[in-house]
Image (cartoon, rainbow, N blue to C red):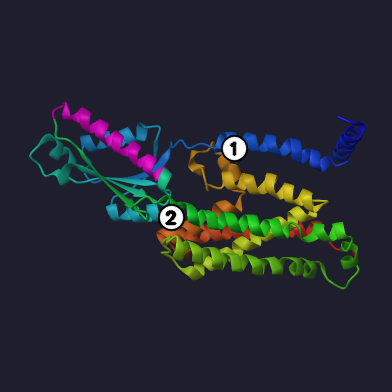
Amino acid sequence: MNQRIRTLIWKEFLELRRTPRLIGLIVVAPVLQLTLLGYAATTDVHNVPIVVVDGDRSPRSRQLMERFAASPYFEIVGEEMDPRAVDDDLARGRAWLAVIVPSGFGEALERPAAAASSRSVQILADGTDANSSGVALAYATALVSEFSAEVRGAPAAAIEPRVRVWFNPQLESKDFMLPGVVAILLLVITTSLSSMAIVRERELGTLEQLNVTPLGRWELILGKLLPYALVGFIDVLLVLTVAVYWFEVPLRGSVWLLLGASMIYLLCTLSLGLFVSTISATQQQAMMTATFFFLVPMMYLSGFIFPIENMPPIIQAITTLIPLRYFLVIVRGIFLKGVGWDVLWPQFAALAGWGVTVLALAAVRSQKRA
């Protein structure tokens, strides 16, 4: 290695030393991501929320319900009297599975000649998350089969589990993943573009010129964000069209509600990009900050890849600060479940609150000097 190369290497180290924020990106970001993802990145399925309907109220049916309650794979979050009431639990996402025991279940187990429908256990699954639902169904049918094998030694007739999957009957992974991909694409594109808004002016030396113009603070912000908002809306229409007509993902809900949710989501992503722009000195730093501290953690902690319910409680609390989490619930709910405003309004409120808060922080950071 000659002297010129050694000198250049030393120069680059000096540049790194003079840029504390860059050192933070190099050291802090990987450690932070590894810590968070080490807990969040799990494909295990446990504590699956289920609702039960015990239409028999016999000792045998109570024994089966107790098996579900004692299993580490399930958590009973509700008990309904009417089997039709589980529709709302599954549609709102309160439960992944519903277990329904028919009237006459216990008596039918003691009489092998009884109709099979009387000793059948119906298991309904929310199929919007194909992978997790498939695993949860396997756990549930295995538990019912194990209980059946035990009670047959009593002796008793076999229990017949009857499985139905709602919202995604074939458990097509693309129907679950592609609506999430729509959300990820909008996040990456609009956040990356808007993160360059202020920092580009600073690098070119034109920010001070803008500061002495009659433009108000909000006028400057709107002028920076509206072009990217238009680009983002065009992307929304494009990716939705491709998802529905090319990949044939079912869109069961209101397209207007979906477009409205997308506009609120764009407020969040553009505000995030603007905030990143105000805390960065260069375009390269803005891109690295947006990618390593925001985009990548959001993808892993939002429920896009790994179910939030499987994460430790402290990580689940952190996910409440991620707007992608709420938009994923909205987009998958509208696409696959066909639910409307009455179900999704909490997610809309969380998105709007997040976007307004971050936009206000960005406005304070980018306060124009008169």
Residue at mark 1: 37
Q: How busy is the neighbourhood of tag 1: few (under 14 within 10 Å), some, or many (20 plus)?
A: some
Q: Is 26 above or below relative to 225?
A: above
Would residue 342 be seen by someone viewing this image from the given angle?
no
Which sits earlier in the primary sequence, circle 2 or circle 1? Answer: 1
Given the image, on which type of amino acid does mark 2 rest?
Asp
Locate residue 156 relative to residue 204 in the image: left or right. left
Could you tell me which residue is drawn at 63 percent across and 46 percent down? Answer: 296
Part of the protein shown in magenta: 132-155
Query: Which residue occupies 71% across, 59% down?
Result: 193
Q: Can residue 281 be seen from the camera position used here?
A: yes
Please state which of residues 369 and 245 is positioned toward the viewer in this rendering.
Answer: 245
- Between disc 2 and disc 1, the foreground one is 2
Instruction: Report the amino acid beneath label 1.
Output: Leu
Q: Is residue 142 left or right of residue 135?
A: left
The residue positioned farthest toward the top in the image shown: 153
Q: Secondary structure at mark 2?
A: helix
Q: How far across and how far down the image is residue 106, in percent? A: 17, 38
Q: Is residue 137 magenta?
A: yes
Q: Which residue is mark 2?
A: 175
| Quadrant in the picture for residue 24 | top right
Quadrant assignment for the N terminus? top right
In the current view of this chain or complex, which residue is farthest to the front? 2
Instruction: Report the quarter where the C terminus lies.
Output: bottom right
246 to 319, vertically: above or below: below
Q: Do callouts 2 and 1 mark residues in contact (Cβ within 8 Å)? A: no
Q: Residue at x 59, y 65 (%)?
A: 235
Circle 2 residues within 10 Å: few <14, some 14–19, many ≥20: many
